[in-house]
Image (spheres, helix red, strand yellow):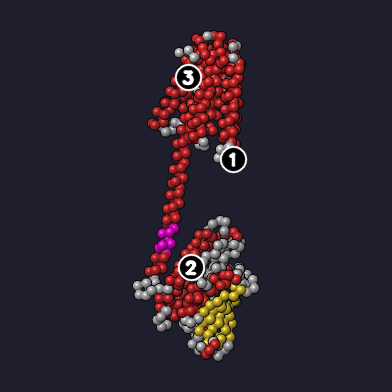
């Protein structure tokens, strides 16, 4: 059984062999610390586990030092010295369990298997050197004590694993308590030599304890990944609900379109769809905490404002669809009354916004001007979109103006009403003045620093389409950095007696 002892015993018994083994152990521990320091973990986790590792090294040194110091003395006959050494060892084991909760699971497993071989070699060398004078019988005591303690630890883990299936409340602390409790119980019936052997064997078995919490860490990591996947599924379900709501909005818009009777204008309906959906997106964006404080308004007031704007534009979009469906039919009193209802709804929204803007317009042109519009509803819908954008982009305490002029068209093509709406919001740059009326697109930053959700031309393309249907037009002009001027040219039935009207 011990034939190998005759070949390597002389070198193991020498001081050089013992110090070589001890130096290899410490270099291995420091190398593991360096590997952990270079691993891809967070700074907080790295500091935490390095602290545990340093405490563990100190505990190893303390237990081994006490064992070697009192090996050849009678101090082991005193129970308090023995119990103190065992307490230090228990603390060292506890420090072993704490660092291996989650990160570096594979490294921990490899560390455990390497540590079993290395620490076993070191302890065997130390025991061989220190107990050489007592003969092979002392080695048999060491092996017997090692086996007893290993059996106690294995029995404790087996009992924990068995009870854990019946009672999930058992955890790794229970297993640790069972293992040490069994070891202390066995130590009561051992003599001094056996106690020395079990202490050193207990110290050599520590890598086995690192494997179990590493496996526990794998289970915890899988549980965390499952929880993370469940969170992602929840987010995907929310996204699906959001897309379904947008699809229902599009379906609701299509139900009120004349798809069954005629081919709709794709540009017009795309503009309407962008109008409604972008307002909903802006409303969701505005509900985030990092957006609304930039406006300087209270949250409740801002919410009410955006809800009112959303409702207003939805009402207008529905009315515009109805108008687009009936635009080839002659105007009658019933349609004009329906438009008045929608227009009053717009006015009510504006009044209830609570914005302290100084407005020099009544959001309605004088009756003489109204009588000249061809057709009235198309022109006033276009005005509603332009005025709504002006309200949206103009800050508080600023002024919005509306002017109406009668003009004579060239080449005896008749007369028209020239309506100019000036806002005090952020001006459009030269590129936007050219491109905004060709294809509407949402701005990159709709709320910085003023509410620019409509600055990119929301509703202006729709207004231009409406005017072009009745031989009118719409264009934009920059007011020298003080806002934007929107000009509407609306053909008339006949020339009025006055040359200009101001609202």
| Residue 113: percent from left, percent from top | 49, 27
Disc on the earlier residue, 2 or 3: 3
Query: Residue 28 got which mark?
Result: none
Would you call the spot at circle 2 few (<14 residues within 10 Å), some (14-19), or many (20 or more)?
many
Q: Quadrant of the C terminus?
A: bottom right
Query: Residue 149 got which mark?
Result: 3
Quote the CA–CA distance across marks 2 and 3.
77 Å
Position above or below: 13 against 395: above
Position above or below: 292 against 190: below
Circle 1 or circle 2, nearest the eye: 1
Circles 2, 3 touching at the beta carbon (< 8 Å): no
Residue found farthest to the front: 7
Name the residue tied to disc 2: 275
Q: In this image, 427 relative to 233: left or right? A: right
Q: Residue at x 47, y 83 (%)?
A: 374
Q: Residue at x 54, y 33 (%)?
A: 99
Q: Main secondary structure of the magenta part?
A: helix
| Residue 241: percent from left, percent from top | 42, 56
Would you call the spot at circle 1 few (<14 residues within 10 Å), some (14-19), or many (20 or more)?
few
Q: Identify the secondary structure beneath mark 1.
A: helix
Q: Is residue 382 visible?
A: yes
The residue range painted magenta reads 242-249
Circle 3 or circle 1, nearest the eye: 1
Name the residue tied to disc 1: 43
Q: Identify the secondary structure beneath mark 2.
A: helix
Q: Is residue 196 visible?
A: no
Disc on the earlier residue, 3 or 1: 1
Q: Nearer the viewer, residue 456 or 318?
A: 456
Quote the CA–CA distance across marks 1 and 2.
47 Å
Disc on the earlier residue, 1 or 2: 1
Quarter of the figure with residue 254 = bottom left
Q: Quadrant of the N terminus?
A: top left
């Amino acid at each position: 059984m011990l034939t190998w002892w005759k070949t390597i015993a002389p070198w193991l018994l020498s001081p050089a062999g013992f110090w070589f083994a001890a130096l290899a152990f410490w270099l291995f521990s420091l190398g593991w610390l360096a590997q952990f320091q270079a691993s891809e973990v967070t700074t907080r986790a790295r500091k935490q586990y390095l602290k545990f590792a340093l405490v563990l090294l100190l505990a190893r040194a303390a237990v081994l030092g006490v064992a070697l110091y009192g090996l050849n003395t009678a101090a082991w006959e005193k129970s308090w010295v023995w119990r103190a050494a065992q307490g230090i060892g228990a603390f060292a084991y506890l420090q072993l369990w704490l660092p291996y909760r989650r990160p570096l699971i594979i490294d921990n497993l490899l560390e455990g298997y390497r540590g079993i071989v290395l620490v076993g070699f070191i302890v065997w060398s130390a025991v061989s050197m220190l107990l050489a004078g007592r003969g092979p019988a002392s080695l048999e005591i060491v092996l017997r004590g090692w086996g007893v303690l290993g059996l106690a630890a294995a029995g404790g883990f087996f009992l924990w694993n068995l009870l854990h299936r019946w009672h999930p409340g058992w955890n790794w602390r229970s297993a640790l308590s069972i293992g040490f409790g069994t070891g202390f119980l066995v130590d009561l019936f051992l003599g001094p030599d056996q106690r020395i052997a079990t202490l050193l064997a207990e110290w050599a078995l520590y890598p086995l304890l690192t494997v179990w919490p590493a496996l526990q860490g794998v289970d915890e990591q899988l549980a965390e990944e499952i929880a993370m996947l469940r969170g992602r599924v929840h987010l995907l379900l929310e996204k699906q609900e959001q897309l379904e709501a947008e699809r229902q909005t599009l379906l609701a818009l299509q139900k009120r379109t004349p798809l069954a009777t005629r081919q709709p204008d794709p540009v017009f309906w795309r503009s309407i769809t962008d109008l409604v959906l972008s307002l909903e997106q802006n409303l969701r964006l505005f509900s985030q905490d990092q957006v609304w404080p930039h406006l300087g308004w209270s949250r409740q007031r801002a919410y009410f404002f955006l809800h009112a704007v959303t409702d207003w534009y939805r009402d207008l979009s529905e009315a515009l669809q109805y108008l687009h469906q009936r635009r080839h039919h002659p105007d009658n009193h019933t349609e004009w009354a329906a438009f008045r209802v929608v227009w009053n709804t717009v006015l009510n929204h504006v009044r209830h916004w609570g914005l302290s803007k100084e407005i020099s317009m009544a959001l309605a042109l004088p009756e003489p001007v109204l009588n000249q519009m061809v057709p009235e509803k198309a022109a006033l819908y276009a005005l509603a979109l332009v005025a709504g954008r002006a309200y949206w982009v103009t800050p508080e305490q600023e002024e919005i103006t509306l002017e109406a002029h009668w003009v004579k068209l060239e080449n005896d093509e008749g007369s028209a009403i020239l309506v100019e709406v000036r806002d005090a919001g952020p001006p459009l740059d030269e590129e936007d003045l050219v491109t905004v009326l060709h294809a509407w697109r949402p701005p990159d930053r709709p709320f910085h620093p003023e509410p620019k959700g409509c600055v990119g031309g929301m509703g202006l393309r729709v207004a231009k389409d409406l005017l072009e249907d009745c031989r009118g037009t719409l264009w934009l002009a920059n007011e020298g950095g003080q806002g934007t001027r929107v000009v509407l040219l609306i053909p008339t039935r006949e020339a009025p007696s006055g040359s200009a009207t101001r609202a």
